[in-house]
Image (cartoon, rainbow, N blue to C red):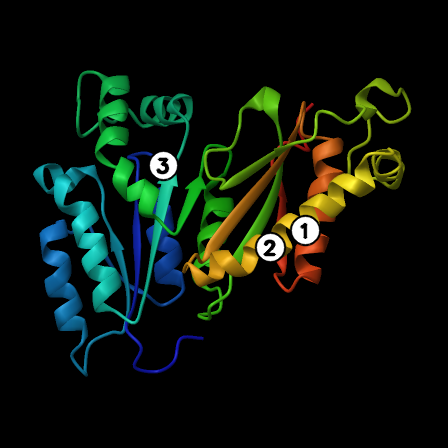
Amino acid sequence: MTPAGTLEVVVITGLSGAGRSEAANALEDLGYFVIDNLPPSLIGKVVELARGADGPHRFGIVLDARAGAFTEDLAAAVRDVRAGVDRARVVFLDASDETLVRRYEATRRRHPLAPDHLLAGIGEERRLLAEVRAGADVVVDTSDLNVHELRERVRNLVAAPARAQLQVTVMSFGFKYGVPLDVDLVFDVRFLPNPHWVDDLRPLTGTDAAVRAYVLGQPVVPEFLELLRRLFALTLDAFVAEGKSYLTVAVGCTGGRHRSVVVAEELARTLTELGFPSQVRHRDVARA
């Protein structure tokens, strides 16, 4: 819960077609007063008015490329928000070019920055928003999320306790499907023997006891997990000291079904033991 009287602003931004409208709906479900398509130059005025005793104290501001000429002011406006409110978080929604193209074609919409050249518009928008993306508290890759999953992800991010603690997510994935867009650290566990080549294990996943026993039984695994434990014991408090609120760690193997799932589960358990309870997501475990 946010303390009474605390002025809290969540900025939702990102690429056109990445799901800003659904994210805004999720904020409204949580009781935020949401303002969509606000020119960045007016953000300071909104913050000033929100300081009034009778105004709402939980705002959601949705910013996108429709602001046109204002886009260059966006990074500066976000910095002003952080300086002017008690709690500010910036959530940047991203997606692969392929996903964005598919969504635009399904809705028959035109891209706001290049109505006649969709890929060019996406590329220009990525360029314009690069600084904002780099400074966001969390980047959410919506490529593989449906509407309900996106809303749930935003609700989980925004409803996190307002304390100086990292919200940590550990994600398993398959390199054959691409490295996730929204991660801070990536670990490659393809050096481990692949259960895919064991007939009895191939149809199973890393959540099954037999696969877990096979992966954890490899001689190199205990030392590898201990090295990870030592790494995060050293860095997690440092991330908090630097003001980082969200950390996403990805663990990848070839297909994202066996080795990465087991190691991600073990890493999440280790982080919890270090005092940082972690969510686990298995991006590709259901893929054939």
Residues packed near mark 1 inside 10 Å, few (<14), some (14 to 19) or many (20 plus): few
Q: Which residue is mark 3?
A: 18
- Three-letter code for the amino acid on which mark 1 is drawn: Arg
- Label 1 element class: helix
Q: Earlier in the sequence, mark 3 or mark 1?
A: 3
Q: Tell me if label 3 and label 1 are in contact, CB under 8 Å.
A: no
Disc assigned to residue 113: none
The label nearer to you, 3 versus 2, is 2
Name above or below for residue 25 compared with residue 252.
below
For the N terminus, the quadrant is bottom left
Question: Is the residue marked by circle 3 packed among few (<14), some (14-19), or many (20+) residues within 10 Å?
Answer: many
Q: Are marks 2 and 1 in contact (CB under 8 Å)?
A: yes
- Residue 259 seen in the figure: yes
Q: Which residue is labeled 2 in the image?
A: 234
Q: Which residue is mark 1?
A: 230
> Of the residues shown, which amino acid type is indicated by label 2?
Leu
Tell me which residue sits at (14%, 64%) in the image: 46
Residue in the image at 32% along x and 41% along y = 133
The Cα atoms of the two marked residues, 3 and 2, are separated by: 35 Å
**Distance CA(mark 3)–CA(mark 1):** 36 Å
Secondary structure, mark 2, is helix
- Is there any visible trace of residue 279 in the rendered image? no
Rate crowding at label 2 as few (under 14), some (14 to 19) or many (20 or more) other CA atoms within 10 Å.
few
Looking at the picture, how far across and down is residue 5, in whole percent? Answer: 30, 81
User: In this orientation, which residue lies closer to the viewer: 64 or 215?
Assistant: 215
- Image-based side of 211 in relation to 96, left or right: right
Task: Name the spot of residue 172 as percent of width and height, x first.
Answer: 64, 37
Q: Amino acid at mark 3?
A: Ala
